[in-house]
Amino acid sequence: MTHPRPGPFQFMDCALTILSLGRSAQNLRELRDGISVVPAPSIFHHYLEGLLKPAFDDPEYRNDFALWARRHLHDNVLAERLGGIDPMDYESVEALRQQTLDVIEDRLAEIPYVASVPPGRAFYFLQSHRVVLDTGLRAATPAELGAQIPRLPSGSIFYHFIEGRRRSPRRADDFSTWLEEWGEECARSRKRLAAIDFHLWSLTELRARIARCLRDLPGREAGE
C-alpha cells in the first residue's frame, strides 16, 4: 500500500512591530520587579524574539536578560545562569517567568550590594506584535524543501524552526514535522535537525546549518 504524500510545505515569513512598555530597570532589583509584572508576551519577546532584531555583533547570549547582565551589569555569573535557561523547557510563559525570577533572587542573595548601571544603559522592557506573511514559496518534495532553505529570509527560519517548536506539542520544528509525514527516508535529516541548538547561532547561521542537514533528502518528483 502506497503511503499518502503530504501536501506541499508552505513557507511563511514573520516580522516584528516592537512596542515599549514604558518600564525600565537600572539595577537587578528593578529588573526582578519588572519581570514579575510585565505581560507574558514581553517575557517571550526578551527570551526569543531578540533573534529577529537587527544586530551588529554576535552575542554570546541570545536572550536579552542574560545579555544585559553581562554587558551592563558586568555580572558574568548571572549572565551564564540566565543564558542557560531554555524557554522551550517550560510549558507556559508563566513558568518561564518564575524560573527567571528564581535565578535573579538567588543572585541577589549572593551579591554584597546591588549596583546600578550608568545612565543610558538601563534595561527597557519591550513587547512585540508579530506579523506573519506568506512568502509564496512551496515545497512539494523533501528535496525541494532542502533546496529552498538557503533562499529563505531570516524571519522564515525564526517562524518555522524556533516559533514552530512552541506550536508543536512535541516541541518539533515545522520542517521536521512535515518531513515526518514522508516516513523513514527522512529520519536521518530529522535527527540532524533535532540536534541543532538554536541558542548558539544567529538566524543566518541557523539557516546554513539547517540547509546542511537537509542536503541529502530524497529527490522524488511530486508526480511520481
Image (spheres, rainbow, N blue to C red):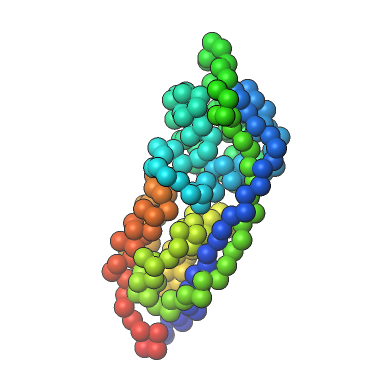
Q: Residue at x 40, y 84 (%)?
A: 222
Q: Position of residue 89 (x, y in %)?
A: 52, 44
Q: Is residue 47 above or below residue 135?
A: above
Q: Nearer the viewer, residue 209 or 141?
A: 209
Residue 27: x %, y % from top left: 59, 23
Quadrant of the image containing the N terminus: bottom left
**Rendering coords of residue 172 (x, y %):** 48, 58
* 42 horizontally vs 107: left or right: right
Looking at the rendered image, the quarter that the C terminus falls into is bottom left
In the figure, residue 217 lies in which quadrant? bottom left
Q: Residue at x 52, y 64 (%)?
A: 13
Q: Please name the residue shown 55% across and 22% down the image.
A: 118
Count numbered badges in the picture.
0
* In-front residue for pair 193/41: 41
Residue furthest out toward the top: 112
Residue at (46%, 28%) from the top-left corner?
Answer: 70
Q: State the image quarter where residue 36 is shown.
A: top right
- Of residues 162 and 13, the one nearer the viewer is 13
**Residue 165 shows in this picture:** no
Q: Where's residue 185, x and y in %?
A: 33, 71
Q: Residue furthest left?
A: 216
Name of the residue lying farthest toward the bottom: 223
In the image, residue 124 above or below residue 209: above
Residue 14 figure quarter:
bottom right
Residue furthest out toward the front: 119
**Side of 211 relative to 67 (left or right):** left
Is residue 202 among the parts visible in the rendering?
Answer: yes
